[in-house]
Amino acid sequence: MKNNTNITYRKVGDFNIPNLILPPEEANIRLGKWGMLHKDYLEKHNRVLFNLLLTQGKLYQHCAEVENQAKDMYATLIEQIKQAEGITEKLKEENQLEWVCCMSNIEARAREIIYNKLIYT
């Protein structure tokens, strides 16, 4: 089925569903962990923004920007917390188990900050 706006539709039961195709630049964007988490959050918890970005063809661009911000923020937070708590390479050489425990804790805190500041907003 076709109307005067050049949008094509397919018939599913009693409904006409538009045949939406991503613009080429959207199809080439690959999202990582952070971008996919943000996309899933929008899809489940902020349907209005999700649909607005999707219909404007900006969803993947938006999620890619969140991905880049999250990567940068993660690296920065890890370094800042390590410095603030005195986690050094010397500790890694002297007591590897303690260093691994400290780093795991720091990484978990950095992830929580990113989830709350970037991903789930």
Image (spheres, rainbow, N blue to C red):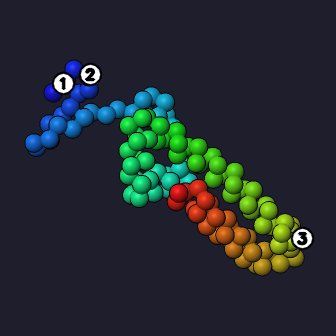
| Residue at the spot 45% in from the left edge and 57% down from the top edge | 41
First-in-chain label (2 vs 3): 2
> Percent position (x, y) of residue 119?
55, 57
Mark number, residue 90: 3
In the rendered image, the vertical position of residue 104 relative to residue 3, given as above or below: below
The answer to which quarter of the image holds residue 20 is top left
| Residue at the spot 84% in from the left edge and 66% down from the top edge | 83
> Percent position (x, y) of residue 46?
42, 54
- Answer left or right for 24 relative to 18: right
Residue designated by label 2: 6
The amino acid type of the residue labelled 2 equals Asn
In the rendered image, the vertical position of residue 36 relative to residue 105, given as above or below: above
Residue at the left extreme of this rendering: 14
- Answer left or right for 88 relative to 97: right
Give the Cα separation between the discs numbered 2 and 3. Answer: 66 Å
**Disc 3 packing (10 Å; few <14; some 14–19; many ≥20):** few
Mark number, residue 105: none
**Disc 1 packing (10 Å; few <14; some 14–19; many ≥20):** few
Residue designated by label 1: 2
Choose between 69 and 98: the one closer to the eye: 69
The reply to whether dot 1 and dot 2 touch (C-beta < 8 Å) is yes
The amino acid type of the residue labelled 3 equals Lys
Q: Is residue 69 visible?
A: yes
**Disc 2 packing (10 Å; few <14; some 14–19; many ≥20):** few
Quadrant containing the N terminus is top left
Element at label 1? loop
- Answer left or right for 75 relative to 52: right
Choose between 103 and 16: the one closer to the eye: 16
